[in-house]
Amino acid sequence: MKKGGYEMNAFWSQWGNVIIEGLGQTLVMVCIALALSIVIGIPLGVLLVITRPGGLNSNFPFYTGLNSIINVLRSLPFIILLFLILPLTKVIMGTTIGVQGVLLPLIIYTAPYLARLVETSLLEVDGGVIEAYQAMGISHFHIICSVLLREARGGIIRGLTIAMIGLIGATAMAGLVGAGGLGSIAYQYGFLRNEPTIMYTTIILLIILVQVVQSLGNGIAKSLDRN
């Protein structure tokens, strides 16, 4: 027992600061990228719904173009997207490494995915309710805010949960190119330096992080569904 405790203390003394820093970097990447993806993705999801054929503001050319762009971006694996937009990342962010250098790829990867999840949730709203509001002469903006988004909020929260879990996985992959975070620790120390203990520790932390996010998301979504 004492030996196990000593080994744990020795491990924490050697790797504690590195792990804490990596966890912090992962949380920063996820939170910032998710926040900006929400700002972009939710409006895109709404536009997909209202401009589609039969939507509140049907505009087939606009819908077709937006739908195609989202499909193209969603079809790109994150690691390919990361390398594909390196020149753009360099111009906009000023760097292609570290937390700052990976934020743009994370946003471009997540926002279209979130838009599609939001679209799916909004399409599940009862069309009869929307038609009733239209018959009463309620403005489209009011219908979007007070009916569509309100009725679909549980599904949107579930979509945000899925997007956040995807972001956590993407940050781990970004660690392969020096983005920092738990993925970078697992690769640089666990794989390249053949330190299996640090590798397993980062994996466990990522699993715990995903479980916490999933549990919180499910709880919030269920609460909103009841209200």
Image (tube, rainbow, N blue to C red):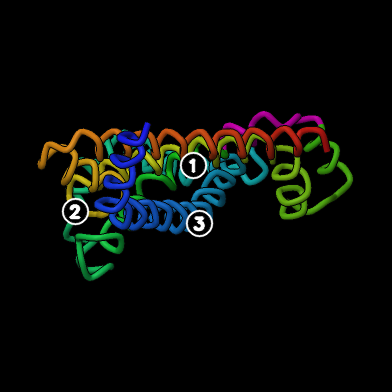
Q: Magenta part of the protein: which range?
A: 119-128
Outermost residue on the front side: it is 2
Identify the main secondary structure in magenta.
helix
Image height of 57 relative to 95, above or below = above
Say whether disc 2 or disc 3 marks the residue closer to the N-terminus. 3
Q: Seen in the image, is 196 located left or right of residue 62? A: left
Q: Amino acid at mark 1?
A: Leu
Front tag of 1 and 3 = 3
Which residue is depicted at the point 10% across and 42% down? 193
Query: Label 2 amino acid?
Result: Gly
User: Measured from the top left, where is residue 97 in percent x and y?
Assistant: 20, 60
Where is mark 2, residue-wise?
178
| Amino acid at dot 3 | Ala
Q: Earlier in the sequence, mark 1 or mark 2?
A: 1
Q: Is residue 4 left or right of residue 158?
A: left
Mark 1 element type: helix
Q: Is residue 142 left or right of residue 124?
A: right
Q: Are marks 2 and 3 in contact (CB under 8 Å)?
A: no
Disc nearest the viewer among 1 and 2: 2
Q: Residue at coordinates 29% horizontally, 53% vertically from top-left?
A: 13
Q: Position of residue 82 (x, y in %)?
A: 23, 48
Q: Residues within 10 Å of mark 3 (few under 14, many from 20)?
A: some
Q: CA distance from mark 2 to mark 3?
A: 22 Å
**Which residue position holds label 1?**
114
Q: Is residue 53 visible?
A: no
What is the number of the mark on residue 35? 3
